[in-house]
Image (cartoon, rainbow, N blue to C red):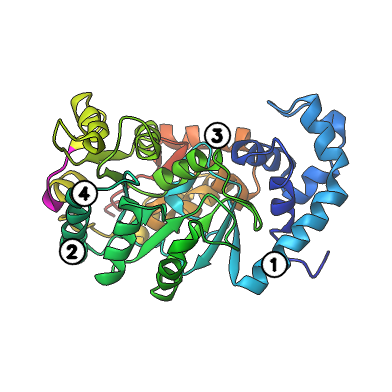
Amino acid sequence: MSNQPTYLAEIALSLIEGVGGATGRQLISYGQSAEAVFQMPVAKLLKIPQIGEVLANRISQAEAKVWVEAEKQVAWAEKLGVQCIPYFDERYPAMLKQAPDAPLILYQMGASAWQRPRTIAIVGTRQATNYGKDFVASFIRDLMPYQPVVVSGLAYGIDIAAHRACLAHQITTVAVLANGLDKVYPPQHHATAQQIVQQHGALLSESPLGTKPDAARFPARNRIIAGLVEAVVVVEAKPEGGAIITAEIANSYDREVFALPGSIHQETSAGCNHLIKTHQARLLTDVRDLVYILNWDKPVAPQNTQATLAFDLDTLGEAEQQVVKHLAKQPQQIILLDDLSWALQMPTAALSALLLQLELQGWVKTLPGKQYALVPRAPRLV
């Protein structure tokens, strides 16, 4: 196993039936590594919250089988140029980590676009009208000065219109698929998918290579679209369907949701109108609405990390200093509890107690989604 990539165990763990993203992170948190989870006896696995007897036995008995399949996935991915990105990897999208059901493994083909601060999703009906497609074209043209990453699902209708408009205007776009990245679905969009990768965008999926686009995988795919972005824009949607599911998930993740209003006589606008009427989405008529709500016209002031740490770091204990120093190195000085636990190799229970003490002392603050941020502190005047 020494020549295998470090994420092989995470892939193996993700291949076990019943191990989703939240369960996988729970197991790794208690075991301190994915490899260690496979070495834990059933009796110890049963002591982990939410791990029942069926799953404990499945993990204990599945090691050889899933390890072989994981090795096949890695070899196949290398052949196709697909990256396997585990949850604790620095390449994993930071926004998606905030979602409680974020996948344990992501498969990605193309460039990593997640360092950009502005990300939105554009979704809608497969039966798009000229009204919806024309709006997408003009909306994305007007997005050019802000250079966001635009995420969608490569489906017919609004999705593919959004991807193609982004390609035409040199805006980075990411397509999230409901199947393995060895195939493009629908196959009619294969050329567009290739162009997305060629123009420094990416194809993304939580599904292992070889996975078919079964119907049940599309709602799961929609949660990834919602989790990757700071806002979801719904352009034409029927009262039920994938775009409405994406909007509902985005609201549950505390993301902004926007919807394009339409005629009350047009079925493809009924879903958008309902989202607006029930206050599940903000009314959107052009890019200015989105820019205003997301504060994209306001520059982000850089934080003075040296001043922050120069304050009175020596008054903290060794473990507390470790936490503060690690936070100071993060983008925007924010980190998820799970990531901090992993980086410092500290159990989450002990780390939570430490963070509480730092919060009481004014060093950190708690953010939604089990995130912690370093509080800007003025240097002491001597």
Indicate whether 322 appears above or below 167: above
Label 1: element kind: helix
Indicate the amino acid at tag 3: Ser
Q: Closer to the observer: label 3 or label 2?
A: 2
Label 4 vs 3, first from the N-terminus: 4
Q: Which residue is mark 3?
A: 352
Q: Position of residue 255 (x, y in %)?
A: 33, 39
The span from disc 4 to disc 3 (Cα, nearest Å) is: 47 Å
> Which label sits in the foreground, 4 or 1?
4
Crowding at label 3, few (<14), some or many (≥20) Cα neighbours within 10 Å?
some
- 282 in magenta: no
Mark closest to the chain's N terminus, 2 or 4:
4
At horizontal 36% and vertical 61% (from top left) the residue drawn is 306
Residue 135 location, x and y as percent?
17, 53
Crowd class of label 1 (few under 14; some 14 to 19; many from 20; radius 10 Å): some
Q: Which residue is mark 2?
A: 141
In the displayed structure image, the side of residue 200 where residue 179 appears, left or right? right
Label 4 amino acid?
Gly
Q: Secondary structure at mark 3?
A: helix
